[in-house]
Amino acid sequence: MFKIHNVISFIFVLLWSSAFITSKIIVENATPFLSLSFRFIFVAFFFFLFYLIFSNKNKFTLRSIFDASVSGILFHGFYLGGVFYSLYNGASASLIALIVSLQPILTSVLAINFLNENLSKLQWVGIILGFFGAILVILTDFNNDLTFVAFFAGIIALLSSSLGIIWQKKVASPLSLSSNNFIQALSASFFHIIISFLFEDYLINFTPSFILAMTWQIFAVSLGAFLILMWLLQKSKASETSTLFFLVPPISAIMAYVIIDENFVFLDILGLIICSIGVFIVIKYKTTS
């Protein structure tokens, strides 16, 4: 079982990291919000099928629909919208993976006020390391023509993912995983359709690379990685599973170098390592109070 757990954990990190690479490919062929609405229409359809098959006794209420919709708009709306818009405006896949990987750090800080949680001394060390590592990479990318719009969109994504975690902890949903994710995906699809209608010129080039990247995101990321994550949470502690996320930025950076020819300098590598160590410390050394 130990070996199987390690293999599945490694597959999860690869799938999660690949999302940033395929997102970059998608926004090279389509406008960001239209492509996300397209993606979540299909994701909602498949989660609805899961709901019909596995959640026969689960009933929707207006409150549960509202709570799941807020989560969907925060996670799949503003978070992924920020990621895609940042990539669309020139941010590298490795940089946006690094920015959003700071989510455990920001969530820990926000939890002080919203959830009355405390931070250990080691966690504060991790926070300092995480932000120092991120600053190194961000400054390097600004020297390589990173725009403020792309950077700001990445920060919106980071804030939204952290607020989504806080919301999930504050709200106890009675819905099953499949029904909850169906509502989340459906609300995200409507959100992106509206944003696209208001602010975008519609564009999707159904190139082979776009079709492959979108198919990968629907099945391997939105469905596959999610199901693996649920399995990992059942088989191990949540804090142990969360430590996997500190591997995402360096793995994404390697994938970006191999698949889409993103370049690295020494400060990029150093920043990624320092940031990953910082995030790991924050997750690993949580207070028990």
Image: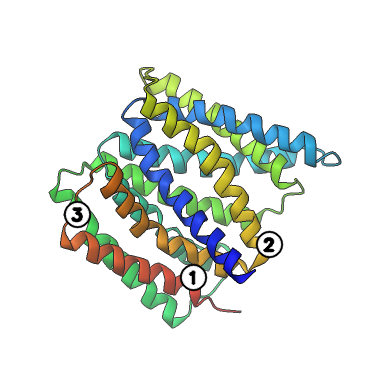
First in residue order: circle 3 vs circle 1: 3
Distance from label 2 to label 1 (Cα)? Answer: 18 Å
Q: Amino acid at mark 2?
A: Gln
Q: Residue at x 33, y 66 (%)?
A: 275
Find disc 2 in the rendering and name its residue: 234
Q: Is residue 111 above or below residue 38?
A: below
Q: Is residue 282 visible?
A: yes
Find disc 1 in the rendering and name its residue: 283
Q: Secondary structure at mark 1?
A: helix
Q: Amino acid at mark 3?
A: Phe
Quick one: label 2, few (<14), some, or many (20+) residues within 10 Å?
A: few
First in residue order: circle 2 vs circle 1: 2
* Label annotation for residue 264: 3
Distance from label 3 to label 1 (Cα)? Answer: 27 Å
Task: Tell which of 192 and 93 is nearer to you.
Answer: 93
Distance from label 2 to label 3 (Cα)? Answer: 37 Å
Of all residues shown, which one is farthest toward the right? Answer: 57
Q: Is residue 240 above or below residue 70?
A: below
Mark in front: 3 vs 1: 3
Quick one: label 1, few (<14), some, or many (20+) residues within 10 Å?
A: many
Task: Tell which of 23 and 108 is nearer to you.
Answer: 23
